[in-house]
Amino acid sequence: MIQNNPVSHAMDVVGEAWTMLILREAFRGARRFDDWLERLAIARSVLARRLKTLTEAGLLERRQYQARPPRDEYVLTAMGRDLYGVAIMLILWEQDWSPRADPSRAIRLMARDGSGPVEPVMAGENSKQPVRPGDLLPRPGPVPGRAPAPKEMRRRKVQPAMRASGKPVELGIELFGDYWTNLVLAACFYRIRRYDDFLKNLDVSTSVLADRLDGLVAHGILTRKLYQKRPDRFEYVLTDMGRALYPTVLAFFAWGARWLCEDGKLPVELVSQSTGEPVIPVLRNAHTGEPIDPRAVRPVPALSQRERAALNAAQ
């Protein structure tokens, strides 16, 4: 279930650092080749290949905006726009948890129709409440099948892409932009904790596994807990920071289920702990319970701590 589920299928399409950075800038309004060149420290050849791949995958549509000389722009399709849940959950996690977060770039969402603030959550049975770890359980779906072989580029560690400013890329993109880190994280959410169990359940070498576990511990996503002495053996347990990635994982699951799996034929389902019924999480506004259309919201600077305190006092 770890290597053949909607999340892993989604990662095989977008789980690579440059791809995620290009999509992030598309949500910020980038459409033309030079837009990405100006915003990302990316080689022209790398950008051209990624745009071609995203277009062939159906996430971007290439449109001509100038005839002489011919020039094209790349516009998000419905499939691409539906990744907004992933994008916004990553942004919010970065703001709340990442040591690399830039407070001056923090955002919140407002409705374009002037109806007020929008609070995005990945909701399940209760349309106004976020799904939390433990609310849903994975089980084999109607068509479990076999896990597809991962692409070679996913097997190689992707070095953190750099912004034009020279600062490291956002931590969330670094984590989800690496195939093996994704797989180890997925195993953690399946409650796998011990080194030998990771090896047993993942098609991974010992050196790669050790590297990814060490990296996740160093970033504060996992913590090591001693469970045996003589010899010392450790478990790798998700921290609060790591568990906070759950909404992003749910967003990947929902997108993969909608776009990469046939209706009624998911290899893995998420079922309600309380009812046993299948649930596909949806990005919703916690204030209204309505699904969020990325075209109906706009980002604005986040409130300062003083502004939040004043707003809470007024309420």
Image (cartoon, helix red, strand yellow):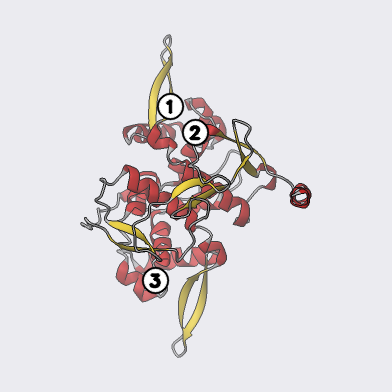
> Which of the marked residues, 2 or 1, is nearer the chain's N terminus?
2
Residue 181 drawn at (x, y percent): 43, 59
Amino acid marked by disc 1: Tyr
Q: Please tell me which residue lies in front, 2 or 154.
A: 2
Q: Check contact, mark 2 vs mark 1: CB within 8 A.
A: yes
Numbered badge on residue 192: 3
According to the picture, the residue beneath numbered tag 1 turns out to be 74
Residue 230 drawn at (x, y percent): 45, 90
According to the picture, the residue beneath numbered tag 2 turns out to be 26
Which residue ends up furthest to the bottom in the rendered image?
230
Q: Please tell me which residue lies in front, 129 or 227.
A: 129
Between the residue at mark 2 and the residue at mark 1, the CA separation in whole angstroms equals 8 Å
Q: Residue at x 61, y 46 (%)?
A: 167
Considering the numbered disc 2 on the image, is that residue within a helix, a strand or a loop?
helix
Q: Residue at x 40, y 75 (%)?
A: 194
Q: Please tell me which residue lies in front, 88 or 42.
A: 88
Considering the numbered disc 1 on the image, is that residue within a helix, a strand or a loop?
strand
